[in-house]
Structure formats: C-alpha cells, structure tokens
Amino acid sequence: MCNRHIIDAAKKLMQQYGLSKTTMEDIAKAAGKGKSTLYYYFKSKKEIFDAVINQEMDDFFTTVKTAVHKQVDASEMLKAYIVTKIKTLKTKVNLYRFAIETDLHPGAINDLFIKLKNRYDNEEKMLIGSILKLGIDNKLYRAEIQDDIDILSELLVTCVRGVETEIVTHNKYKTLTDKADMLVNILTKGIGR
C-alpha cells in the first residue's frame, strides 16, 4: 500500500512539473514519507517514473476492456474499443502534456508510444480476437475468417494505432467518432455476412 501511495504522489508531481523538475525529496514530501523510505521501495526517480508509467498503462487498458465488455454486439465492441482507447489516450496525453513538452525532446514521444505498443500488443490482439470470435458465433461475421483471426486482430490493432497517433499528434479529436464508425463499417463490410 505504501508503494501505491508513493506512485500516486509521484504521478501528481510529474503531471504538474514534469520528470526533470520533480525530485525524490518532492515525492517523499508529497507522499508524507521520508526520503529514505522512498529509497527502500525504489532505487531511483527513474524507477518511480517507470512504476508510474506501468500503473498508467494498466489503468488505460483496464478502461478500454471495461468499455468493450459493456457492449453485447461485436461491432459495438469494436467501436467501443476504438473510441475508448483514443479518448483515454487523449486524457493521458493531456494529463502529461506539460511533462511531455518539457522533459522529452521531439522524437521521444514516439518512444513512449512504442513502449505502450510493445507492452500491450498481445493483450490488444487477444481482445480484438475475442470480439471477432463473438461476431462469428453470432453470425455477424463470416465463419471463413476464423483461420485469419490472428492476422485480422494484428491488422486492426495496427490500424487503430495509426488513427490514434494521427488524432493525438494533430489534435483531431473532434473527428474521433466519425473515424471510429468509418473504421468499424469498413471492417464489418469486409468480414460481414
């Protein structure tokens, strides 16, 4: 529990001031702990930052899965996946906007996206695969795609990632729902019955 409290305090400071301007002393003070207590749990500020990012990524994917599982229709699940993923990403980027602008050089944001992509590739593919299987079971999608679910899942995850990168890097959030509808319509027409 102490670990989580330290991570939460660090997250607030890093969102407000950025990584480079947040010190171990600041984190200890915000968490109501001594600096030596921080070093008991974490070897460095970078290790705390990694813990913050891991927590954020876990929260991010939990939000997406929860939105998807609230839907009953496979097409609505795909739309929920796309819209929630991008909206949640927008929120996270806005929370960390100051940190991103002050701490990271222009190319480093791509490293952040790559780290996110690598960590959740398999989980996202499995989620999309389960949606596609549901669509097949409910006769919404053609049974012939069963053998290609892994490939289709990977393609969809890659496609959504491209859309989200465009939306985030160019602040095109207003077109989000239209793009999600269009993407789901293209996909379902291609694999639909």
Image (tube, rainbow, N blue to C red):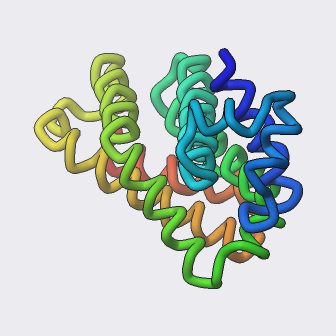
- Nearer to the camera, 180 or 37: 37
Which residue: 36% across, 35% down?
Answer: 123
Residue 17 occupies quadrant: bottom right
In this picture, residue 129 sits left or right of residue 175: left
- Nearer to the camera, 46 or 59: 46
Residue at the extreme front: 36
Task: Please provide percent x and percent y for residue 70.
Answer: 61, 17
Q: Quadrant of the C terminus?
A: top left
Which residue: 56% across, 39% down?
Answer: 42
In this picture, residue 135 sits left or right of residue 63: left
Task: Please provide percent x and percent y for residue 140.
Answer: 37, 28
Task: Please provide percent x and percent y for residue 26.
Answer: 84, 48
Q: Quadrant of the N terminus?
A: top right
Which residue: 82% across, 31% down?
Answer: 31
In this picture, residue 178 sits left or right of residue 128: right
- Nearer to the camera, 159 or 95: 95
Residue 178 in sight in this render? yes
